[in-house]
Image (tube, coloured by chain):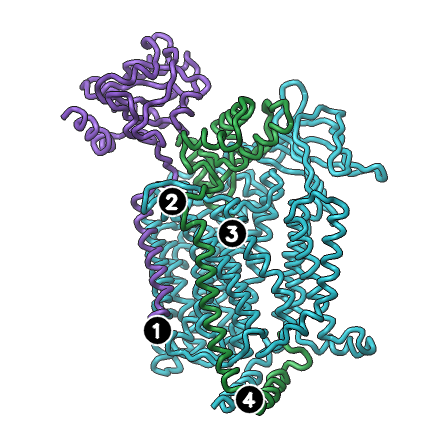
Amino acid sequence: MVAEIGQFVLILALITAIFQGVFPLIGAAQNSQPMMRFASNAALVQFLAVTAAFICLTVGYVTSDFSILNVANNSHSLKPMLYKISGVWGNHEGSLLLWSLILALFGLAVAVFGRNLPDTLKARVLSIQGLVGVGFLMFILFTSNPFERLDPAPLDGSGLNPLLQDPGLAFHPPFLYLGYVGLSVTFSFAIAALIEGKVDPAWARWVRPWTLAAWGFLTVGIALGSWWAYYELGWGGWWFWDPVENASFMPWLAATALLHSAIVVEKRDALKNWTILLAIIAFSLSLLGTFLVRSGVLNSVHAFASDPARGVFILIFLIVVIGGSLLLYGIRAPQMKGGGLFAPISREGALVLNNLLLSTATATILLGTLYPIFLDAFTGAKVSVGPPYFEATFLPLAIPLVIAMAFGPFLAWKRGDLAGVISRLKFGLFLSLLLVGFIWWQQTDAPVMAFVGMGLFAWLLIGSLLEWSDRIKLFRGPLSSSWRRMKQVPRSAHGMTVAHIGVALVVLGITASETWQTEHLGVMRPGEIVSVGGYDFRFDGAETIAGPNYEAVRGTFLASTGSNKGDYLYPEQRRYTTPPMETTEAAIRPMLSADLYVVIGEEDGTGGYAVRIYHKPFISWIWIGSFVMFFGGALSLSDRRLRLGAPRRTRQQKAVATDLSGVKG
Amino acid sequence: MTSIFRPLALALLLAPFIVLSAASVFIEEKLDDPAQEARAREISGEIRCLVCQNQSILDSNADLAKDLRQIVRERISLGDTDDQVRSYLVERYGDWVLLNPPFKMTTLFLWLGPAAIFLFGAFAMIVFLRNRSRSVEGESTARLSAKEEVEIEQLLKPDKPGKNS
Amino acid sequence: MRFRFLTPVLAFAGIAVVMWYALFNLNPTEIPTELINKPAPEFALEPVPGYGPGLAQSDLATGKVVLLNVFASWCVACMAEHPFFMKLKAQDTVDIYGLNYKDTPDAAAQWLARHGNPYKRTGVDLKGRVGIDFGVYGVPETFVISPDGKILDKIIGPVSEDMFDARIRPLLNGAGS
């Protein structure tokens, strides 16, 4: 019964989405209030309908209703409840339903929070959201129906891929999708602006919170994904430049560029066309990320050979959405005139440089990801593009980006004073070189990238702190006045500082863990002790234990230094039965200074076990830094001017803009 | 592709991030010379496993990956240079096995593309910046820059005391 | 200069066309053989017990086009092509040689006894080394070998009648004419 209800509300959602996509658009063109107001109601109904469908599927999973094909294929009655629930989106059909749910949620959010939007803009934005929803719901209903029945129902399900039975991965997709789908709002704003033919600072101000939110979720989603890869796959790696990872990294880079270029629109009424294009590209890359890995085009398996309809549908959808919006851009963009003028050395100039580097990085990753297909299509030759390529091409772009990140915030709008900025950054440069010198003194033969990375970390960290203290005039007056200033500085400015510091911490984590990691790989017998990274690891033996739906070999290790008693670590090698598969559960002792990472593997037949032990200095800072970046975004989002003052601010901005044009003429 | 890989790979597609085959520590014979073993690991880390998703043979417990790891060790112990080991594998499986794509005609645009994109972007940026600033410079006289000062003041006012956000 | 705004949509159109082509025509899992028009690698193998005198490189240069099929008793997909190979043998369309890949000789012999032997000669590649020399990365794979022992093509996965007509038969006829 529950499946039929789910099916019904899903169809209801599709019909609502079609109405939501069509009527407000007509209403906005004819300036018909009722038709425009319909948008918000439709968004609410669509959200309720998709939520109901999602609840239906969840009920199917929770009650292990194996008469639903999707449940039977992906769940099992013995699975822990958390994974029964996360199993809802741990498969193709369910994850698309989650996508639609989040899309409808964002649509509703625009309807609710967008009270101060002009009627036509709001109607158009919601209508574009509706049209995107139509595509997704049609894809679900016609090619990937999660409510398909199975008759007769099997006694039990075939289980969820054990690698997905993990708390990190249970929450990774929702965050990632919140990010992907959040960009749909920015996209809808961009398309609406193209239809209206008007982009102004107010538009940028309205778009900013949505971009910030999407960017923040995407940051967390990617961080969770890499954290999961780090502890679940058991190689100690956390980023593999895999097509699937790239598919999430590209929208992130584009969203980061968008975040920065939108500031120029907001403050200076310039870079408008470019910002619109970035908004389209960012969401297009999200769609690519969601779809391409499923279409069979990009991935290494003809996964949907059995159902080519999916691949065809996906491509048509991409062509309509991406091609259509880029075509609209090509037609409408020339009519938009750029606003404010500025010198190359200025805040605007720095943000343009930021955009150049970020979009080149995005394009490079796209090139590397798609190149094998292109080469195959044109010449029939097969190549692989792996991590070495991406590292070789990404780093040369990332390094100048980080260097410029310390400069940018110091530069004044319109015309900056580079010499002045350099003199204010002298201290940062000095400390960075001091750190590099110290490392060189400690370890003359360290790899070059170690010096570069640590130097960049110090440079960006100190540069950001200097700029922040400059802003609140720290130590240049009584502390109380600095405190007062700090409270007066808009939260979005603090947010920027925090986010940039987050980047510095990520740089620290990557550099230190790549450079100073130590590893032991070999067979250990009970009682044996090996020393890795200053810790003694004693292997106390292994035993077989039973989990709820798996059996595991669990090793016991004691990691200690001379000065402490030590910590026990329990790595596991799990063997799941449905589906039959082995997984590695690394035992990790995370610390701020380093992670201890132990993996246990096969037994050698004589009581010894294959063991891999890592000591990874500062690696936690990759995820701490990511979270700090997210926090920076959240802080910026909490800026009250974004929530309350938008209309008032708009008028002031406009006044300034008018004055400027007066001066110019 | 043997049929056992397919359902697995299909299941893998469903996670937004790729899921790879799991066991990551194996027991196998190593070369006695640690320097040679380190070379073998280095090379294996950049040879793509043929029957896995994007994964090197170093990280895979697939049968074929094990065999290829052993071959890499064998070639090294026979005195092959790193390049010779790689070309031994390329002769059999093609450039596809190299995770680090070689620089040649077929990969020309792959390797030069990023630089081309950057230069194109940089060119567009310079043209754009010159357009933006020429008007500033062109009309800038002492009188105007004084006016500009005022405008900058105005611009900053709403943001007081910070100058950005 | 208005047209520069159309660059993005044109670039995307290019990508979309290639994607469309790739979806229908390319298979990213197939890694074609590097050995096209090169002589088959050198090898000499023992037969599956009871099935012929063994298989070596020199046996492949027969003066006519032949097939070298990589098979194993543990290979599920091999069962899909096996009946077709039996038919080819019955019709005497082409000689097929069997390379038994990473199998045990007994299991292979049992498999051939149970399902029938389509092969003219068989060779046991216990450790899979010959397979690697041939660039085999999965079972089944089928090589088309020219009259002078060169590799003309490789079919990855089970050979179906359609695939045979499309890719192998022209090679047979080409050598005949």
Whole-percent x and y of residue A630? 62, 61
Judging by the rendered image, the residue that carries numbered circle 3 is: A393
Residue in the foreground of this view, choosing between A148 and A571: A571
Chain letter matching colour purple: C
Give the structural element (helix, strand or loop) at label 4.
loop
For marks 4 and 3, give the one nearer the viewer: 4
Quadrant where the N terminus of chain B sits is top left
Judging by the rendered image, the residue that carries numbered circle 1 is: C1
Q: Alpha carbon of mark 2 to alpha carbon of mark 4: how far?
A: 55 Å
Amino acid bearing label 4:
Thr
Judging by the rendered image, the residue that carries numbered circle 4 is: B141
What is the drawing colour of chain A? cyan
Residue in the foreground of this view, choosing between C112 and A248: A248
Numbered disc 2: what chain? B
Amino acid bearing label 1:
Met
| Residue name at image x 69 percent, y 60 percent | A459
Amino acid bearing label 2:
Thr
Q: Alpha carbon of mark 2 to alpha carbon of mark 3: how far?
A: 18 Å
